Amino acid sequence: SVDSSQRSMQQQLLLKLQSNIQLPACLQVIGVLRRLRKHSEHELRFLFLSCRDSWMQSALNQVVGNHTLGSYQQLCKITDIVRMHTFEIVTQYRAIFLDYISGQEDDSEADGGLLFAWANRRISGCTELIGKGLGKIKEGSQLASLLG
């Protein structure tokens, strides 16, 4: 049936958002999801951030689960992932949802604070993760490198 085909396509599109895709592909996915008219604009924003967050969390889980890395290497990789993925997700979000409704990019009210809440939660989680790892580093130069 048409409904089951649409649900299947939607699931495939959401899985694509949970992978390492660039802005043009993100724009295509959100464009198709908009045309399906199954979600409000606010729901699309939430879905986008949830899916992209899953992508980032997957990358972090790979590093945290890699027990062959030393604490210093692990923290370096974690900070790199958080920095690069956060920048990419925020950039993609702002490009896709450049306030689709009001036309204003800086209006934090327009998305109900979704982007701010997501970034705040993600950075808090990163801070906690780094805090746990810092206690395992005993060499001063490594600490200075991470914190500098």
Image (cartoon, grey):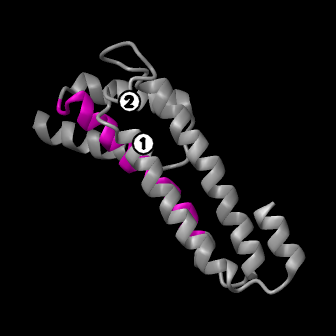
Q: Earlier in the sequence, mark 1 or mark 2?
A: 2
**The residue positioned farthest toward the right in the image shown:** 141
Instruction: Report the side of 42 relative to 70 (left or right).
Output: left
User: Is disc 2 placed on a helix, strand or loop?
Assistant: loop
Give the quarter of the figure containing the C terminus: bottom right
Q: Can the viewer see residue 69 in this picture?
A: no
Determine if the magenta segment contains residue 140.
Answer: no
Q: Position of residue 131 (x, y in %)?
A: 61, 74
Task: Please name the residue shown 59% across and 79% down the image.
Answer: 132
Q: Main secondary structure of the magenta part?
A: helix
Q: Is residue 14 above or below residue 141?
A: above
Please report contact status of discs 1 and 2: CB closer than 8 Å, yes or no. Answer: yes
The magenta stretch is 38-62
Q: Is residue 92 above or below residue 130?
A: above
**The residue positioned farthest toward the top in the image shown:** 103
**Residue identifier under label 2:** 108
Residue 134 quadrant:
bottom right
Three-letter residue code for mark 2? Ser
Residue 64 quadrant:
bottom right
Q: Position of residue 28 (x, y in %)?
A: 43, 26
**Residue identifier under label 1:** 116
Task: Please name the residue shown 50% across and 24% down the image.
Answer: 95
